Image: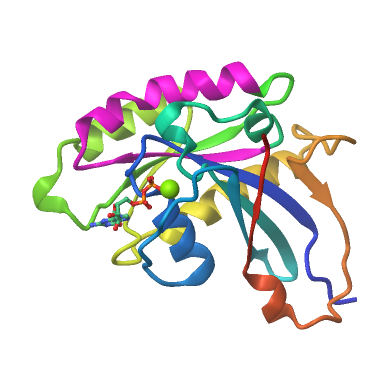
Amino acid sequence: MDTIWLYQFRLIVIGDSTVGKSCLIRRFTEGHFAHVSDPTVGVDFFSRLLEIEPGKRVKLQIWDTAGQERFRSITRAYYRNSVGGLLLFDITNRRSFQNVHSWLEEAQSHVHPHSIVFLLVGHKCDLEAQRQVSRQEAEKLAAAFGMNYVETSARDAINVETAFMDLTRQIFELVRGGDIKIQDGWEGVKSGLVPNTVHSSEEVTKAGRQCLC
Ligand code: GDP
Ligand code: MG
């Protein structure tokens, strides 16, 4: 039977304000570079299907912090119900790179009893002339954290698919190997064999807004 998705993974995208989180998510889910205006409350969610192996589709539910990162007021529920995360900094903004540590600490202090698989992302790699963080330095930090590193551009559509695919594959392997388990009452990973009878184009990209307050 043809299926729409096998697993649903919930991902978060964190990092300083203006590093490009919303633009990266929009590029991945909507396929274009859009000016993004943040709402003042709640979180935005977006979803997209990824085929990680022939016939094996994962539905990604991606949550955006919707401006709350400015105040570091992201709720515990946002972290603890996620299985994966993109930890973004802007390669032209050294401070955003230095703040990667505190974002990771913040996430780790809220995620208990679960854990989040993170990918370190150096964003806006189209702005090479303004680079303030070298690739080697970022790779070293990622290795110290036990993460992979990728450089992306939402503007020029560089490595956007690669970033989400890399993270999704890592999580998929951990789920397949039993290191990450599906649990009642946890939104991080869900499984389901949904027959492919609806128009899948409707399923591919869906955005919404929800308050986690
Ligand atoms: P957020 O606060 O982290 O969600 O950041 P936004 O997605 O709202 O983006 C902040 C600013 O960075 C906006 O002016 C975007 O146009 C710009 N931006 C986002 N992604 C890129 C990119 O890949 N390249 C360049 N050059 N600018 C980007
Ligand atoms: Mg944003």
- Residue drawn where x is 77% and y is 41% of the image: 187
Residue nearest the observer in this picture, 7 or 73: 73
Residue 204: quarter of image: bottom right
Give the side of residue 209 with respect to residue 93, left or right. Answer: right
> What is the quadrant of the C terminus in the image?
top right
Task: Measuring from the top left, give residue 38's x and y in whole percent.
Answer: 45, 51
Q: Quadrant of the N terminus?
A: bottom right
Residue at image point 21% right, 31% down? 94
Q: In this view, does 150 lie to the left or right of 133?
A: right
**Can residue 139 be seen here?**
yes
Relative placement, left or right, of 59 versus 97 is right
Above or below, 6 relative to 94 = below
Residue most toward the front?
Answer: 40
3 or 89: nearer the viewer? 89
| Quadrant of the image occupied by residue 53 | bottom right
Q: Can residue 161 be seen in this view?
A: no
The reply, left or right, for residue 4 in relation to residue 68 is right
Q: What stretch is highlighted in magenta?
A: 82-110
